[in-house]
Image (spheres, grey):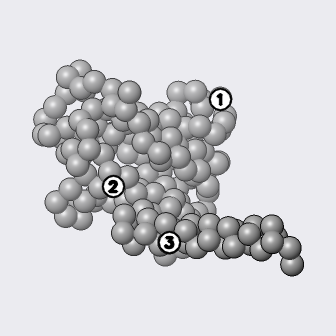
Amino acid sequence: MERNERLILVASGTLMGVFLILLVYSGLGLSVVVPTCVTDVAPFTGGKVEQKGIGQYDVYLVSRMWFFDPGEIRVPPGSDINLYLSSLDVTHGIYIEGTNVNLMAVPGSVNFARVRLEREGVYRIFCHEYCGLGHQNMAGKIVVAREASAVSDANLAPAGR
Ligand SMILES: [Cu+2]
């Protein structure tokens, strides 16, 4: 084996080791959760928001032609949202403005992402997968406000810009 080959092998092995350490650190140390398809939650037909603790919410979001159920979600700043997404009819997609949440909503399955919303404001939700004639109007929103149920949308600036 030539010297350069040995050098490349050592560098490659070192890099893979560094990547593995960073992967374990992001999963265990930073609690990063990769968006995924979950199999322990049955596909659901109705949307709901469940508070699981202080600042902890489970959101069951249903996509259908051509709206999201629930269309508006209200949480206080600093909330952690476990988002479960399903579809009743065709394949949709969601993007939550100002976050890195970008999921497909596939009929018969449930996709999952976790997001923390720190800043007050309105985080719009868009369908990003063409789903028929009303696709361009398919949107929802997450309103993050200190008094989530008492604040009107007019007082809130769009978040994530
Ligand atoms: Cu759509």
Q: Residue under label 2, please give it.
A: 81
The reply to whether dot 3 and dot 1 touch (C-beta < 8 Å) is no
User: Which residue in the rendered view is the most extreme toward the front?
Assistant: 3
Which of disc 1 and disc 2 is earlier in sequence? 2
- Residue neighbourhood size for the residue with mark 3, other residues' Cα within 10 Å, grouped as few (<14), some (14–19), many (≥20): few
Q: Residue 150: x, y in percent?
A: 13, 35
Above or below: residue 158 compared with residue 30? above
Q: CA distance from mark 2 to mark 1?
A: 30 Å
Which quadrant is the N terminus positioned in?
bottom right
Q: Secondary structure at mark 3?
A: helix
Above or below: residue 14 compared with residue 57? below
Q: Is residue 152 left or right of residue 107?
A: left
Residue type at tag 2: Ile
Q: Using the rendered view, name the quadrant where residue 27 is placed.
A: bottom left
Q: CA distance from mark 3 to mark 1?
A: 47 Å
The reply to whether dot 2 and dot 3 touch (C-beta < 8 Å) is no
Is residue 42 among what the camera can see?
no
Residue 133: numbered disc: 1
Q: Using the rendered view, name the quadrant where residue 128 is placed.
A: top right
Q: Residue 161: x, y in percent?
A: 38, 27
Which of disc 1 and disc 3 is earlier in sequence? 3
Q: Using the rendered view, name the quadrant where residue 60 is placed.
A: bottom left
- Residue neighbourhood size for the residue with mark 1, other residues' Cα within 10 Å, grouped as few (<14), some (14–19), many (≥20): few
Between circles 2 and 1, the one closer to the viewer is 2
Q: Residue at x 33, y 39 (%)?
A: 142
Q: Residue at x 44, y 65 (%)?
A: 26
Residue type at tag 1: Leu
In front of the other: 37 or 25: 25
Q: Is residue 127 left or right of residue 123?
A: right
